[in-house]
Image (tube, grey):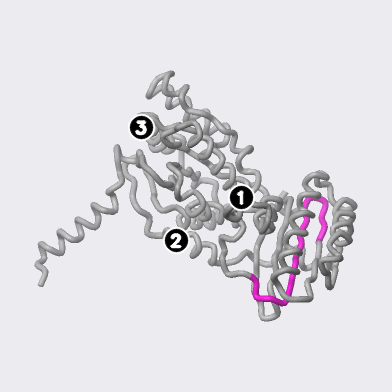
């Protein structure tokens, strides 16, 4: 039998454990493995109060400190760090333009891997980042939210401590809710706590799918009912011709996108069940494709976010497809398996 005092002690111990990783209020922790924190703020003052101690804790621990934010946020944080810690500490904080990192979701995940590999090669003690994701970038908030969940798996082994900052004045309720689900810890100026809403990456990725793309309500520009290995070259040529004729996207973007479709179609031919069909919709600033086969597809929602082990060139198809498209989704239906991939911005979003 547990006394009332014992129950109170248990509750207090649980609460203490939930705050166990708080050092200097919201400073985060230093050590092996990925630490992924979220800050929700409503003013520059709120941002500074939480993010500057976070950065200073990393500098004090000998970590490399980076800002990956929009230009205004960079200026605010750099100026505050200069005022509070002095020019020497401020000069130790690097800046990586957010627009360079957040071009495509899969590429952004790979960019952070590259940062960490460079730090490891240089003998660094870890990296401390204050980051601000652009949920309006191509791919849309749904895919960028998935990327936030994916990094918890992909970056798990790296000594990276990351504070993702979210301006609650401008982000939609859907984005804020997704950010709560993808970050294990929450930070304020006063405290850092474990997040009850957090979902493990695979659980997050198996969550709700985006609504049907409006482009699919129109007849496709190209519809190939069945394609085999011998017909892939002709398929690429047909898709490329239609995309260049009806799209204003750069030739490089189109060529990479056609390669992404080719990789998905090749996977369907090799691992799915015939017939394999391909459809392409073309708008001036966006392309959408759907590749369908009669098989059951794959069940791992993390597939394609990491290149296959071993570093070889085989089995890279889905990884390349994610790198060369802004949004890639999969769907299992009663009639088969469909991979949809798009690039560019919807006309109604511009």
* Secondary structure found at label 1: loop
Q: Which residue is mark 1?
A: 311
Q: Is residue 219 above or below residue 141?
A: below
Marks 2 and 1, Cα distance to the nearest angstrom?
A: 30 Å
Q: Which residue is mark 2?
A: 199
Q: Is residue 37 visible?
A: no
* Circle 3 residues within 10 Å: few <14, some 14–19, many ≥20: some
Residue at (47, 28) in percent of width and height:
93
* Secondary structure found at label 2: loop
Q: Earlier in the sequence, mark 1 or mark 3?
A: 3
- Residue 5: where, in percent of width, then height? 10, 62
- Residue 80: where, in percent of width, then height? 43, 27
| Residue lying furthest bottom | 334
Q: Earlier in the sequence, mark 2 or mark 1?
A: 2
Q: Is residue 158 visible?
A: yes
- Give the position of the N terminus as an image quadrant: bottom left
Residue 61, label in figure? 3
Closer to the camera in the image, 284 or 242 = 242
Residue at (65, 66) in percent of width and height:
330
Q: Is residue 184 left or right of residue 114?
A: left
Q: Is residue 17 above or below residue 264?
A: above
* Secondary structure found at label 3: loop
Marks 3 and 2, Cα distance to the nearest angstrom?
A: 29 Å
* Residue 292 falls within the magenta-colored stretch: yes
| Magenta stretch bounds | 281-297
Residue 285, label in figure? none
């Amino acid at each position: 039998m547990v006394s009332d005092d014992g129950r109170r002690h248990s509750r207090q111990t649980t609460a203490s454990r939930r705050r166990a990783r708080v050092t200097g209020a919201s400073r985060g922790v230093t050590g092996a493995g990925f630490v992924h924190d979220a800050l929700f703020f409503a003013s520059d003052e709120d941002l500074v109060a939480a993010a500057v101690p976070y950065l200073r804790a990393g500098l004090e621990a000998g970590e490399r400190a980076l800002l990956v934010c929009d230009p205004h946020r960079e200026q605010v944080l750099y100026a505050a760090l200069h005022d509070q810690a002095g020019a020497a500490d401020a000069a130790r904080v690097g800046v990586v333009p957010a627009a360079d990192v957040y071009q495509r979701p899969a590429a952004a995940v790979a960019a952070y891997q590259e940062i960490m590999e460079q730090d490891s090669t240089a003998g660094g003690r870890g990296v401390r980042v204050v980051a601000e994701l652009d949920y309006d970038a191509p791919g849309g908030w749904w895919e960028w939210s998935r990327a936030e969940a994916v990094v918890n798996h992909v970056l798990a082994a790296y000594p990276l401590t990351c504070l993702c900052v979210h301006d609650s004045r401008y982000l939609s309720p859907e984005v804020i809710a997704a950010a709560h689900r993808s970050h294990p810890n929450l930070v304020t100026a006063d405290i850092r706590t474990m997040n009850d809403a957090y979902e493990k990456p695979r659980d997050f990725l198996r969550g709700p799918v985006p609504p049907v793309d409006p482009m699919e309500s129109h007849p496709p520009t190209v519809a190939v009912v069945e394609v085999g290995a011998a017909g892939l070259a002709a398929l690429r040529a047909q898709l490329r011709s239609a995309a260049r004729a009806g799209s204003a996207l750069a030739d490089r973007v189109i060529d990479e996108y056609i390669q992404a479709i080719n990789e998905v179609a090749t996977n369907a031919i090799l691992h799915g069940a015939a017939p394999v069909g391909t459809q392409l919709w073309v708008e001036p600033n966006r392309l959408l494709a759907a590749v369908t086969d009669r098989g059951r597809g794959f069940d791992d929602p993390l597939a394609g976010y990491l290149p296959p082990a071993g570093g070889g060139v085989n089995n890279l198809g889905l990884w390349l497809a994610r790198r060369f498209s802004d949004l890639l989704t999969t769907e299992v239906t009663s009639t088969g398996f469909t991979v949809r991939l798009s690039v560019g911005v919807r006309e109604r979003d511009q």
